[in-house]
Amino acid sequence: MKQIENINIKEFTSILSNYIKSTSKKMVKTTNMVMDLDFANWMSGMGRDKKWFRTEVKFDGNSYIFTEKEITDEKFISILNDALAISGVRGRVVYDVCGDGYWLPKTYYFKSLEIFTKPCKEFISLVKYVDKNANFTIGDTDVFRVSICGKRDSHSDTGRYNYLCYNNTMCATILKTIRENKATRDIVKVSVEDYIDRGDEGDYRCAMYQESEWYGHRGNKLIVKIETPKGKKKLYREYYN
């Protein structure tokens, strides 16, 4: 692996944007992808004597090392967002934030960079129909499912995000269900709600008691309701990708 030291941030951002663009061209037509990208800040010492001594970013067969000034997680997230904007590729930076900014300062933790191709045509048809008939816009990444690993009451994402916008079978099913059940004057209501599935309830309770890890899923589900003009419920469906 080739090592490149202390290049300026503008040049580094440009290299990242080119890497994002070239990677996106290798993707299949309708999918999302977590990019091969490693980021780390190295420290020396222990406790109060701990000091930063370098930032290292690895991608595309190169290791970019910064020793003059630390690139924090928050700064790296900003760099990636700039690189995405320059590349013109659809994507998002996945990160965690600890602290509320009031009682505790906000601390950012970079997790991954995810890029997307265009959604499937069935999702586009569903979005257009819902936007027209329910006055609601479904974003490309609004409805998703991801594996999680937890301990006690906290958890973190462990798998790839699966999005409704690439699930052509489910999108077609949702649109077909609405059309088959909606009369001319009926009202369609669509919403997105988050959920968490902690897996088998017995395994979860056992893990909580033993303070061991538990596994499950979380995400956002799509809720579809159809009502008559007088408010009578005709249909209620929850869709988990």
Image (cartoon, rainbow, N blue to C red):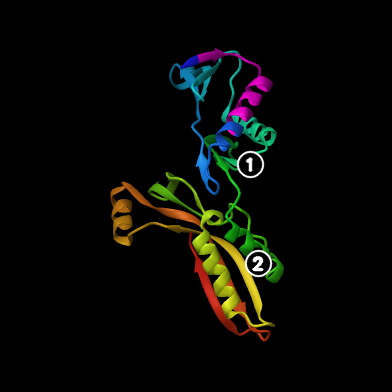
Mark 2 crowdedness (10 Å alpha carbons): few <14, some 14-19, many ≥20: some
Decide which of 29, 206 is in the foreground and name it.
Answer: 29
Magenta stretch contains residue 39: no
Q: Residue at x 51, y 57 (%)?
A: 167
Q: Quadrant of residue 85?
A: top right
Q: Residue at x 65, y 31 (%)?
A: 83
Magenta stretch contains residue 4: yes
Return the residue at label 1: 102
Vertically, is 56 above or below 146? above
**Which disc is residue 130 wearing?**
2
Where residue 56 appears, x then y in whole percent?
51, 21
> Taken as a whole, is the magenta stretch helix, strand or loop?
helix
Q: Secondary structure at mark 2?
A: helix
Q: Is residue 154 visible?
A: yes
User: Could you give the CA–CA distance between mark 2 and mark 1, rounded to whole angstroms?
Assistant: 39 Å
Please state if 177 lies on the left or on the right of 102 as rendered: left
Decide which of 218, 178 is in the foreground and name it.
Answer: 178
Q: Secondary structure at mark 1?
A: loop
Where residue 13 appears, x then y in whole percent?
65, 25
Where residue 22 appears, x then y in whole percent?
58, 31
**Disc nearer the start of the sequence (2/1):** 1
Please state if 196 lies on the left or on the right of 212 as rendered: right
Q: What amino acid is found at the position of numbered circle 1 in the picture?
A: Tyr
C-beta proximity under 8 Å, tags 2 and 1: no
Please state if 233 lies on the left or on the right of 46 as rendered: right
Vertically, is 133 above or below 202? below
Decide which of 179, 16 is in the foreground and name it.
Answer: 179
Q: Is residue 98 visible?
A: no
Mark 1 crowdedness (10 Å alpha carbons): few <14, some 14-19, many ≥20: few
Where residue 221 appears, x then y in whole percent?
52, 61
- The residue range painted magenta reads 3-20
Q: What amino acid is found at the position of numbered circle 2 in the picture?
A: Val
